[in-house]
Image (cartoon, grey):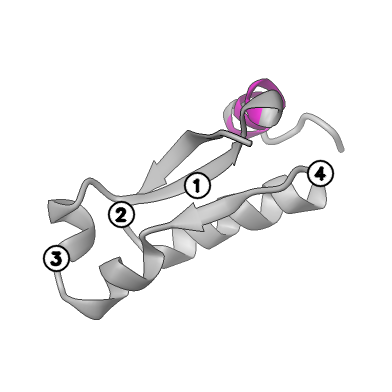
Amino acid sequence: MELVTVFTAFNSAEAQLIRSRLEAAGLRPFVRDELSALSMDGYALAAGGISVQVPETEAEAALELIRDPGVGE
């Protein structure tokens, strides 16, 4: 299963909010690089952010939810 990045955040709270929304919609999100970003100040920015990823087959649905939060309600 290949994972695709659908959102990049520069703080853990924002990444977890998106993860939670995708999970509530029945998708299978994964937050990548969160622990590394929390280990050192400024690391999230230097590393390119905290990635929220989903399986490739769910990417289109995830992007739609992220773009329009009213979808699926």
Q: Quadrant of residue 45?
A: bottom left
Q: How far apart, in angstroms, are the residues tagged by discs 1 and 3?
A: 18 Å
User: In the image, residue 50 lies at what x, y percent?
Assistant: 36, 53
User: In the image, residue 39 lies at what x, y percent?
Assistant: 25, 79
Q: How far apart, in angstroms, are the residues tagged by discs 4 and 2?
A: 23 Å
Mark 3 or 2 closer to N-term?
2
Q: Could you tell me which quadrant the N terminus lies in? A: top right
Q: Is residue 22 magenta?
A: no
Residue 68 visible in this rendered orientation of the protein: no
Rendered image: mark on residue 42: 3
Rendered image: mark on residue 30: none
Q: How far apart, in angstroms, are the residues tagged by discs 4 and 3?
A: 31 Å
Q: Secondary structure at mark 3?
A: loop
The residue identified by callout 2 is: 10
Crowding around mark 1 (Cα neighbors within 10 Å: few <14, some 14 to 19, many 20+) is: many
Q: Secondary structure at mark 2?
A: loop
The residue identified by callout 4 is: 25
Which contiguous range is marked in magenta?
59-66
Rendered image: mark on residue 52: 1
Tag 1 near tag 3, CB within 8 Å: no
**Amino acid beneath label 1:** Val
The residue located at (41%, 47%) in the rendering is: 51
Tag 4 near tag 3, CB within 8 Å: no
Mark 4 or 3 closer to N-term?
4
User: In the image, residue 49 lies at what x, y percent?
Assistant: 29, 50
Would residue 28 appear left or right of 13 to someone viewing this image? right
Would residue 68 appear left or right of 26 to someone viewing this image? left
**Amino acid beneath label 4:** Ala
Q: How far apart, in angstroms, are the residues tagged by discs 1 and 2?
A: 11 Å
The residue located at (19%, 52%) in the rendering is: 47
Tag 4 near tag 1, CB within 8 Å: no
